[in-house]
Amino acid sequence: MIVVTGGAGFIGSCLLSYLRKKGAGPLVAVDDFGKKEKEKNWKGIDRLLRVDRQNFFQWVKKSGSEIEFVFHLGARTDTSETDEAIFNELNLEFSKKMWEFCASKSIPLVYASSAATYGNAEHGFSDQSDIIPQLKPLNAYAQSKQDFDLWAMDQDLAPPSWYGLKFFNVYGPNEYHKGKMSSIIFHAYNQILKTDQVKLFRSHREDIEHGEQKRDFIYVKDVLSVLFFFYTKEPNSGIYNLGTGHARSFLDLSKSVFETLKKEPQIEFIDTPENLRPNYQYFTEARMNKLRDAGYHHPFYSLEGGVSDYIREYLIPAKYF
């Protein structure tokens, strides 16, 4: 039995579908299933056992012995949220209980960390264990992820194998429900359909041109492949980056969306909201040698390839993964 928390969400629902296609399971999805906008993410997955997040630790008292692996992907991910209590409850305390459960039952654990923990990247983007305590996150969400990473690294009692994955900018199908937190590809696609143009934030740094802010964008299909690698191979435990290792600009991304839709690029630059400017990351790029050294050698989608596949196979036909 494989447990996936956040099973009604973006990456979690894609992972459940991916595991089903691989013949793995039985599958257990843990989440708040009362949100109608998420229903299509999981309703097409057959033989799926659903457990409400609030009842999970009561449920495991009866069925915990059947669990062979846990993917703990559920979290509060709104980077604009400022209520630290929410993050402490959902991202920190729930994660500690999950860790302690997996450790007590000798169950391997993958959990979602975040590239947001790197803050302004004054220490770069290395996932080596000696660098992680030096990181300085820029918002409450990122701090909650950093706090759990540090807590996990400090534990003597641990799951037999455990992996904290620092997700960079993930995009792909099943993010329809995320609203403002959806990927820029999703927003660009919908903007072009409505207005034939894309709006991007201006750069507010003299050394960076408008649209040349860069992120490490990773297609969710690559994320699923890496997650399955950890499930099947169980390399050395620790915290790993999960990006492509290649930063690309928002301008590149927007042009890829226009090209896929066979439209001429029309881009308008707008001011970055003042409340976002102090914490705005102008560059992210995962160092991926740790994952490669662990034995993962599959190539990642290029930005152009991922954007094209996402739009043609999912957004245009409004399909789910």
Image (spheres, helix red, strand yellow):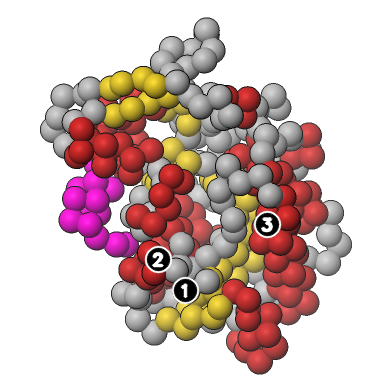
Residue 4, given in percent of the width and then of the height, sits at 53, 70
Q: Which residue lies at the image location 69% right of the left edge and 36% below the top edge?
A: 137
Residue 52, given in percent of the width and then of the height, sits at 56, 78
Magenta-highlighted residues: 308-321
| In front: label 1 or label 2 | 1
Q: Which residue lies at the image location 46% right of the left edge and 62% below the top edge?
A: 9
Q: Find residue 86 and name its label.
A: 3
Residue 299, given in percent of the width and then of the height, sits at 40, 43
Residue 302 seen in the current view: no
Q: Which residue lies at the image location 74% right of the left edge and 40% below the top edge?
A: 132
Cα separation between marks 1 and 2: 8 Å
Q: Find residue 34 and name its label.
A: 1
Cα separation between marks 1 and 3: 19 Å
Query: Which amino acid, by three-letter code, is at mark 3?
Result: Ile
Total count of labels: 3
> SS for tag 1?
loop
